[in-house]
Image: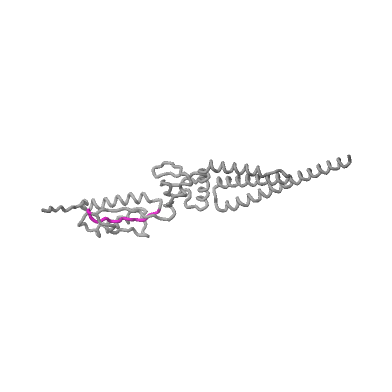
Amino acid sequence: MNDLVQSGLDAILQAGLRVIAAIVLFFIGRQLIGFASGLVLRSLRAQRLEPTILGYIGSTLSVTLNIVLIVAILGFFGIETTSFAALLAAAGVAIGAAWSGLLANFAAGAFLIVLQPFKAGDLIGAGGVLGTVQEIGLFVTSVVTPDNVLTYVGNNKLFADNIQNFSANPYRRVDLVAQLAHGVNHQEVIRQLRDRLGNVPNVLTTPAPDLEILEFTLAGPVLAVRPYCANAHYWQVYFDTNRIIREVGTEGNLPVPQQHWQVQQVS
């Protein structure tokens, strides 16, 4: 009888020690999880990630590590965890397959924020959209097009496409052309255009505007008219340059360019 009681007490004592050890392991594990999560988040915060991304990464990391901790504690009690781990793996695969598109957009968004090919306020062309970036979100990026339409583009579509950042450099070149007729003194036209471009607001003097013959057509030579300006003044310089091209042609009574064909009759 005494042996039976002693065996029972030993079993209770061992179980109690296991429970105490599991509780201690749980609290130590929680402290380590908090420390690891904080360390990772501080490292990511130094990369200037968006708070939304930081919160999502922190929550995902915390949940994952807590699941690992619970599985470890169950294993400490001698509970078979193989089937539990397999169930979690199957659930992860199912969720990943169902959310493949969302996860791809999320991963692309993380890369966009870390690599920073563009930022909010930049004028970009990517994913078939041209406009100013309003916000880089968790799954989509919002872009305002030049005609003031708010467009949402999946991050994966942006990241998988070529990205043109028109705001990355301090100035841009405005590419325009002026068609001249045959017989027009192109050097005089270039001189007049250069003088007038100097009076257009926000046209840079360094680098100086490019004014040269670009090509020849049946109607005559084509001039390249290419002033430089800051990004914010692009459209103002674009329209003003078009205006002075028109004024130079009108005030100088330049002939209208026409294509000429010579027809010969073969007898």
- Relative depth, front residue between 109 and 135: 109
- Tell me the colour scheme of the image: one colour
- Relative depth, front residue between 73 and 42: 73
- Relative depth, front residue between 84 and 212: 84
Tell which residue pokes out farthest to the left in this image. 267
Tell which residue pokes out farthest to the right in this image. 2
In the rendered view, would you say 128 is above or below 206? above
Left or right: where 263 falls relative to 175: left
Q: Quadrant of the N terminus?
A: top right
Left or right: where 81 falls relative to 47: right
- Relative depth, front residue between 139 and 149: 139
Question: In the rendered structure, does residue 228 fall within the stretch colored magenta?
Answer: yes
Q: Which residues are magenta?
A: 218-230
Question: In the rendered structure, does residue 187 fall within the stretch colored magenta?
Answer: no
Residue drawn where x is 23% and y is 55% of the image: 220
Left or right: where 265 falls relative to 103: left
Residue 188 spot, x, y in % from top left: 24, 59
Looking at the magenta stretch, what is its main secondary structure? Answer: strand
Residue 65 spot, x, y in % from top left: 64, 47
Residue drawn where x is 63% and y is 50% of the image: 38
Residue 13 spot, x, y in % from top left: 81, 44
Tell which residue pokes out farthest to the top in this image. 1
Residue drawn where x is 86% and y is 40% of the image: 4
Residue 218 spot, x, y in % from top left: 22, 54
Q: How many marks?
A: 0
